[in-house]
Amino acid sequence: MSPHPTLPTADLHVHLEAAISPELLRALAGRAGVVLPDGFGPTGFAWRDLTTFVRDYDVLCSVIRSEEDYAAVAFDALARAAARGAVYVDFIVSPAHGWINDIAYGALVDAVGDAIDRARREHGICGSISLTAVRAPGPLFGPENALRIVADAVAHPHRLVRGFGIAGDTRFDALSAYVPAFRAAKAAGLVTRAHCGEGEGKAGVITALRELEVDILDHATEALWDDALVEEIVRAGRLVTVCPMAHVMVGLVPTLAQHPAWAALRRGLKVALGTDDPVFFRTDIADTYEEARAHAGLDDAALVALTRNAALSGLLPATEAAELSARLAPETRDFGLGEELSRAQRALAHRVRTWSDERAASLLGTLVTLAQSRPPLEVVSAFARGCLLACFEHGIAVVPVARPTPATSPLGLLLEQCALELEADAETQDAVDARGNATALWKAAAAVRAAGRLLG
């Protein structure tokens, strides 16, 4: 399939090793003297089941033997993605697989970070790194090594290392065993994510959501069939990474057309797309967006909103996030909601550089979600003027609440939760006698609540 020629895409779920091209893999295997499995061809591995998938993944990792190899894989993957319209890729990186080849944590992330910076200079594509622990047997995996990864991230900070998560075989270790590592990651300021909703069903999603308290749910496929659990994820404001082709090929969903993410999107689920393991699932992010267009009925504006979800996930450094948001902002005019919405979004993309990055990103994401729902213009005005301008300019009166009853719709409830969080922040600022900040936050909370109640 061919993507829309100007459609900006983002891959928020791709494992670095499996982002390798078949051509580069053949070259590295030849240099290392490793024989590739039968069936390996121009599109990648020809695995048949979990056993052959794990075997082939071990072969893949065995040929990426140095930090220079990791850098080569990252740069090549970014260059190929950019050539097909991608503007952002977050690589999921396993330090334990580096340890297997005696690659120190610092050498690994520095090399991959340099490759990302080079790709940005040469191809205009942004990148970031999510560290991952791995559920697997062996001395370098498991809960204790998850803590080791977080400790390494703290001892060797890197501006592109923004996330921490868990992946691997669900047959090893309970997901709840990783709670200490996730608490440490949150304390270190990392965005947290977890592979869940695969082999252990929706129970894994519940653990990730309620016990690990992750920011991003990776896959969560089994949960997306459950309306009540989808509603909980929407209310919590969590982002879900969806890898459609991977889910079909591993048997989690029968066909692309039957993927439960498409219905969940219509119920307000915040989604970003991913390719997972391209050399195994024979896809790229451009084709993944076209799959969403074909099977979810998404138009260009809705697809760009998925890219914006990725940009505002917190995994991209603040400066790059602001710049990418500004690049994506013109697409929001396609919603037909007026120039005021576009002005508000551009203002927020600019202000994200100087204000609280996480809060600004959250508000911008909510504004975009609001725009996608195509509400009456006065709702957009209430949110844009009351929330954005009051919050950032400290002085615009809140639009009166035209519908005083509490919010009941999914988006209305999401805005209500956002308002409560803003009020909590205001109380914190008031407690330390930061009255100016507190006043701005109170106004923002009132505006968000007004917008939620206008939605009903």
Image (cartoon, rainbow, N blue to C red):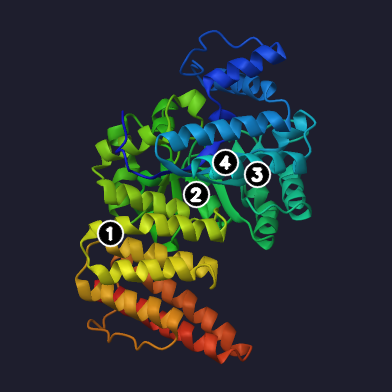
- Quadrant where the N terminus sits is top left
Note whether residue 331 is visible. yes
Q: Earlier in the sequence, mark 4 or mark 2?
A: 4
Question: Does 436 appear above or below 324?
Answer: below
Q: CA distance from mark 4 to mark 1?
A: 28 Å
Q: Please tell me which of labels 4 and 3 falls first in the chain.
A: 4
Give neighbour class at mark 2: few <14, some 14-19, many 20+ (Cα, 10 Å): many
Q: Position of residue 57 (x, y in %)?
A: 60, 23
Compare marks 4 and 1 and give the one earlier in the sequence. Answer: 4
Q: Secondary structure at mark 4?
A: strand
Q: Which mark is nearer the camera, 1 or 2?
A: 1
> Mark 2 — residue?
217
Q: CA distance from mark 2 to mark 3?
A: 24 Å
Residue at the spot 64% in from the left edge and 9% down from the top edge: 35
The 10 Å Cα crowd at callout 1, few under 14, some 14 to 19, many 20 or more, is some
Alpha carbon of mark 4 to alpha carbon of mark 2: how far?
15 Å
Say what secondary structure mark 1 lies in: helix
Q: Residue at x 58, y 85 (%)?
A: 429
Q: Is residue 348 left or right of residue 97?
A: left
Residue beneath disc 4: 91
Q: Residue at x 55, y 31 (%)?
A: 76
Q: Which residue is mark 3?
A: 113
Q: Which mark is residue 372?
A: 1
Three-letter code, disc 2: Leu
In the rendered view, tell whether residue 392 sits above or below residue 350.
Answer: below
SS for dot 2: strand
